[in-house]
Amino acid sequence: MRIRIKDIADQAGVSVGTVDRVIHKRGNVSPAVKEKVEKVMTQLGYRRNIIASTLALNRTLRISVLLFDNKDYFWEQTRLGIEKAQDATHHYGVEVSILYCENPGDFRKKTKQILDSRPDAIMFAPLYKEEGLRFIEECHNRSIPTVLINTQLDAPDTLCYIGQDSYQSGVVAARLIHFGIPDHSSALLLNLDSSAANAQHLMDKERGFRDYFNEIQSKSVHVYAANFEHEKSQNDLRNFLSGVFEAHPDLRSIFVTNSRAYRVVECLKEDELEKLFIVGFDLIEPNIRHLKSNRINFLINQNPTLQGYLGVLNIVNHILLKKDVTPIQYLPLDIVVVENCEYYVNSDYAFPAVV
């Protein structure tokens, strides 16, 4: 039996307009009346037809996404997750547009472009802390819901954050290295990034990494942190690492704080790799290849595909489905080795075809 808004209004003793405001959460309804209407809706088994409502409003939900470096493996996987989510929600009239930026100046330019387009919601990774906080404030001032992925900031004016707990991922990396290197050796924490000093997630990873080794009593490990601009050539990286080896002859491990561990492996000689315990992030093709050849010891999976997918779904849940959204949604820190790698590579996390 089809339940009409008029049926609810008659039983609740209110107007059809009041029921409509309750259903669509448009306000101007007292708490007591709202509770009464919702109780009748439950008793009658009323379920809002979201698709019909969206079509009736002739509305498109426009989501703007800002990612980084469209040639980077990590952001390519994020894009794939976004496309999966768009396919699963297209019947709601969801449209997603993706822009890419490469540096803080370009970030500011692209965020202005996004705001000028007046989207219904925005998803982005605030890799540049200062610029990210400024953008969040601008979105809040314009009442545009924002979802953060990959990098968590202390920004209460966002809808939610989806991604890894960066501090704990640094702790996990340190624990893995702890079991793989001898006492009184050095560990290099390497940021292959052009703006590490302004990147909150990299600072959080370093803090977790250092805290772990500062607190353990069973082994003395010297942590050395360094930044290297990822735009530079492999030859430049090779020379940089040669200088590190010369300055730290007791170096036995390298923790690469993003998805570019493969770059370190590909500029080192086999005899150098045999002495090193390497931990990196993410199941991208070159990292997987070096994991399988035992040149990378562990990969911590941040699952960029799931980040992109859940980012879009949370916006749909909030704006169209009127569901509550959990503000912080940490994804599991999966530790991937040779033996379980194929499981993660071949699993599709059961992304539903339709939501």
Image (cartoon, rainbow, N blue to C red):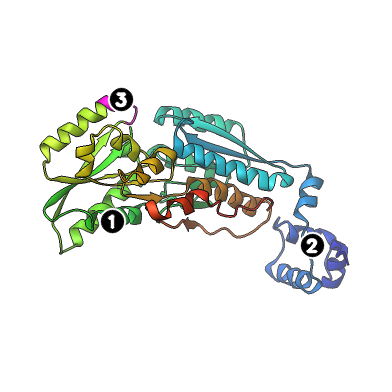
Q: Main secondary structure of the magenta part?
A: loop
- 216 vs 132, nearest the viewer: 216
Q: Residue 3 in the image: state x and y as whole percent.
A: 85, 65
The first of marks 1 and 3 along the sequence is: 1
Q: What element carries label 3?
A: loop
What's under tag 2, amino acid-wise? Val
The first of marks 3 and 2 along the sequence is: 2
Task: Choose top left, top right, bottom left or bottom right for residue 10.
Answer: bottom right
The residue segment tinted magenta is 230-235
Residue 176 disc label: 1
Magenta residue check for 232: yes
- 146 vs 281, nearest the viewer: 281
Q: Residue 298 in the image: state x and y as whole percent.
A: 33, 50
Q: How far apart are marks 1 and 2 (CA)?
A: 57 Å
The residue sitting at 24% across, 34% down in the picture is 268
Q: What element carries label 1?
A: helix
Query: Could you tell whether 303 is left or right of 38 in the image?
Result: left
Q: Residue 265 in the image: state x and y as whole percent.
A: 29, 37
Query: With respect to residue 83, does 7 lie above or below?
Result: below
Disc 3 versus disc 2: nearer the observer: 3
Q: Estimate how packed mark 1 is, as few (under 14), some (14 to 19) or many (20 or more) residues with alpha carbons within 10 Å.
A: some
Query: Could you tell whether 95 is left or right of 288 in the image?
Result: right
- 22 vs 317, nearest the viewer: 317
